[in-house]
Image (cartoon, rainbow, N blue to C red):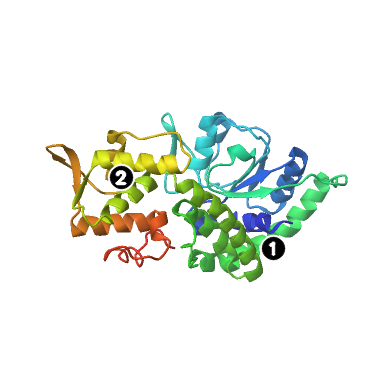
Amino acid sequence: MNQNLQAFALASWFLDCVPVSPVLYLLGPDNEARLVLRLLGCICHRSVLLADVDLAALATLPRSLNPTLLMSQCHFGRRITQILLSSSNPKFCVTRGKSQVYAYGAKAFCAELETAESTGVRVSLTPALDVLPHLTPADENARANDLQAKLLRYFMLNCERVREASVDTRDFVPTLREQAHAWLAPICDCPDLLQSVRNSLLQQNQQLEGESCTHNVNLAAEAALFFCHDPNRDHFFVRDAAVEINTLLKGRGEERSVNDKMAGSLLRKLGIRPVKATKGYRVLLTDAIREQIHQSAADYQVFATQDGVARCRHCSAGKHTQHGVV
């Protein structure tokens, strides 16, 4: 079995020990994907094989069941997809009218490439050259009876170790760090498997890094950092930030743009609050604001912080205190 699939099955047993539940996307032919889901059903914790999912069915899941949902359906409605992905964090509840939906648990989706956009691990399946093996219900039961007992013992012996595991996620973009922890913590004592899964996550991380460079908040941090490195500036206006963000977007092949109001909102998300002046809203580049901008740029891993070049005396401020490191 593919090592990422092994890691997903193990991670499904340790949902109480990690910050979020693992999410898996299977990309490839339907028949092969369904066979993989059936095999995962033999080894994942409290696995439920689903051919269709709707909101009414999700609402019937009991609290604290934490099932592994193995879904062969490729296309969901937007609302169902949001609920399934939002329920990957046990600290935040999902509501439906006056009631709550308890859908926390590991999740595996059959997915088209364009739909597998959220954080999670993607496994590509190739068409089988030979006839796929016939997996009978008796085969599934035999596999499950044998492996579930072994996995339960593995969980009992390792739950405290996994709960206390220290996983270095500094190489990952912030949006992938919790998923990386959920996948890697249960296999910390399996070095070969750990390295293989980590490499797969890092490959996906490269794609997310490319996407993050055009994320609006990242661009606002990069624009603010640009003004910090202009030795002739002691302030910049929100409209200046909008112009710089749009220049960055154009340079990276993006056709969209931001206006002054959006730029001000993005700066506030970074904790930078422009103040009203005669000619508009401006940001005074005091030492404290410069340090804050550098820290935000480091946290969002903007390009100018990745080359190791110190362009001003504040450039090393964010290197030792990056947020989100597990």
Image quadrant in which the N terminus is located: bottom right
x then y, percent, for residue 259? 31, 33
Where does label 2 land, which residue? 269
Q: CA distance from mark 1 to mark 2?
A: 48 Å
Graded by Cα atoms within 10 Å as few (under 14), some (14 to 19) or many (20 or more), the crowding at tag 2 reads few
Residue at 35 percent across and 50 percent down: it is: 222
Residue at 66 percent across and 49 percent down: it is: 123
Mark 1 or mark 2: whose residue is earlier in sequence: 1
Q: Are marks 1 and 2 in contact (CB under 8 Å)?
A: no
x then y, percent, for residue 300? 39, 53
User: Which quadrant holds residue 52?
Assistant: top right
**Does any portion of residue 141 appear in the rendered image?**
yes
- In this view, the residue farthest toward the front is 232
x then y, percent, for residue 127? 79, 44
Where does label 1 land, which residue? 150
Element class at badge 2? helix
- In this view, the residue farthest toward the left is 278
Residue at 76 percent across and 43 percent down: it is: 32
Element class at badge 1? helix
x then y, percent, for residue 213? 45, 48
Q: Is residue 19 above or below residue 313?
A: above
Q: Nearer the viewer, residue 222 or 130?
A: 222
User: Which quadrant holds residue 322?
Assistant: bottom left
Three-letter amino acid code at the position of disc 2: Lys
Graded by Cα atoms within 10 Å as few (under 14), some (14 to 19) or many (20 or more), the crowding at tag 1 reads few
Three-letter amino acid code at the position of disc 1: Lys
Q: Is residue 75 above or below residue 205?
A: above
> Is 85 positioned to the left or the right of 112 in the image?
left
